[in-house]
Structure formats: structure tokens, C-alpha cells
Image: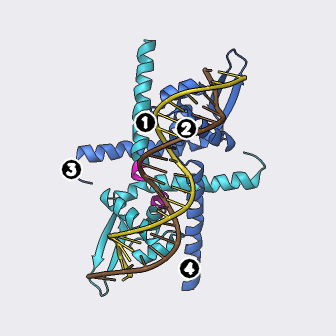
Chain colours: A cyan, B blue, C yellow, D brown
Amino acid sequence: MKKKAVINNTSVCQVRMQAISDTMSILSGKWKFHILGTLIEGNKLGFMDLLREIDGIGTKMLSKELQDLEMNHLVSRTVMNTKPITVEYAITEYGATLSPLIRELAKWGIDYRQSVHGSKGV
Amino acid sequence: MKKKAVINNTSVCQVRMQAISDTMSILSGKWKFHILGTLIEGNKLGFMDLLREIDGIGTKMLSKELQDLEMNHLVSRTVMNTKPITVEYAITEYGATLSPLIRELAKWGIDYRQSVHGSKGV
DNA sequence: CAGGATCCTTTACGATACTG
DNA sequence: CAGTATCGTAAAGGATCCTG
């Protein structure tokens, strides 16, 4: 009985850790959350729009991260028929399932600032 | 009018990006979510317990990440009066505020597996 | 405009061995 | 048991320049 409980708990942990690893690997790096968050706000943005909105990112990182996100079906990429060509990036329906996570991430960060500013410790 | 709206939106974005950066920097690295998740499940674990539960981590990373987390008041460290000494790590009340975030992270990872296995694409 | 190619620096991480 | 010290590798990220 006890042994079984431990085994179950262990496997539950394994599942959680695997899931967290998956999410982290897909959203790894310094910029993906910023890109996704920006695309969730204002849908349909050009490469340059993103470059301007996301403070500090360069063209190399932006294009690389966008490719990663596109590969995982989190953002869509549409080449417009203009001259010179422009590209529109947008969040996909699937990518939008990350909204709660990103909201939590931002919320916690804001609360953190408050807890550091507001009181002394903690 | 229009200009003001844009400015507001921009500053809202800046706040979000700052918040996300804060959270990411505090929870950076490969292991912090795993450590926190493990401590949230079973409270009060020893160094070796964590080493066993968290698959793949080594002593160096574990001790370093635990120090980071302790500095940010997310976990507590208690040296027990045993011989040889043992140490108990636990999640703090403040660290527990990360539960929703970690749950979301794990949930999304699980859903992701499902969407990859279940159907072909997306 | 959108991005690829190149080069370079920094950091993260891991393995191993050692200590109170 | 609970770490620290040392060493080495790999990956991430940034700056700059170039192209269709």
C-alpha cells in the first residue's frame, strides 16, 4: 500500500516534470514570451513592427524565434503581395492557448515588483 | 487622440514586457520550475531527496539553484540538528504564489503532448 | 522590407573530485 | 549528508554586414 502510493506519486511527478520540460523547450529563450505576448495584444504585425515593439531584440533573434514559433504552430506567417514584400505575423488559435500562461507570467512579475517595492522584504 | 492611445498601448506593453522579464530572470534556467514544483508537492525535502526526485540534476546545479531560490524568498532552508547534518528545504508562502503559474506550465505541456499525439498536425 | 551569413562573447550547464 | 571547487563544452545571444 505505502509502496504503491509512493510509486504513483513518483510517476505523477515524472509526468509533471516531463510536461514542464516540454513547455520550457518550446518556449525556451529570452524572447518567445515577448513575441507571443506582443502578437496576442495586437494581431497581425509586420517584422519591423515586432522589431520596434520588442525592446532590445535584433533581426537575427527575431527571425530565428519566429521560425521556431511557426514550426510549433504558435504563430502564422503570411507573405503579402506588396513591393517590396511585407510579411504579417499573427498568433494562431493554438498559440492563443498560451494566453493564460502568459497572463500568469506577467501578473506574477507585476506582483513581484510590488512586493519588493511595497514592503521591505518578501 | 490617436497618438495618445498609441502611447498608452506602448506603455502597457512596456509594463508587460518588464514584468515578463522579471519573472523570467527569477525563474531562469533549466531547473527552477522542477525544484519549485517538487517542493510544492511534497513539502520539506532534503538535499538528497531533491537530487533523487529531480531527474538528471547534479549537486552543483541543485545547490546553486536552491541558493537563487532562497535569495528570492521562494524556498526556505533549515539546517537540522542531526549528525551528520541534514537540511530541509521547503516552499515558502511567497513561493507558493507560483503554484498557478507552474500548474499552467504543466497543463499546457500535457495538452501539447496530446495535441501532437492525438491528431496529426497542430 | 525581411531576413540570412558571419563572427565573437558570454553564460549555462555538466562531470568529476574533494571536504566538514 | 550537504555541499564546494575546478575544469571543460556547448549553446545562447549580440553586433555587424550583406542581399533579393
What kind of residue is marked 4?
A: Ala
Could you say which disc has been placed on residue A16 in the image?
1
Q: Are marks 3 and 2 in contact (CB under 8 Å)?
A: no
Q: Which residue is identified by label 4?
A: B5
- Picture quadrant of residue A122: top right
Quote the CA–CA distance across marks 3 and 2: 37 Å
Front in this rendered view, residue B70 or B94 = B70
Q: Are marks 1 and 2 on the same chain?
A: no
Q: Residue at x 77, y 50 (%)?
A: A119
* Residue that numbered label 2 is attached to: B61
| Amino acid on which the number 1 mark rests in the picture | Arg
Kindly report the distance in space between the C-alpha atoms of the residues bearing marks 3 and 4.
42 Å
Precedes in sequence: disc 3 or disc 2: 2
Cα distance in 3D space between marks 1 and 2: 20 Å
Outermost residue, right direction? Answer: A120
Q: Chain of mark 3?
A: B
Q: State which quarter of the image contains the C terminus of chain B.
A: bottom left
Which chain does the residue under circle 1 lie in?
A
Label 1 sits on a secondary structure element that is: helix
Looking at the image, residue B116 sits to the left or right of residue B100; the answer is left
Q: Is residue A26 inside the magenta stretch?
A: yes
Residue B4 percent coordinates (x, y): 59, 82
Say which chain tag 4 marks.
B
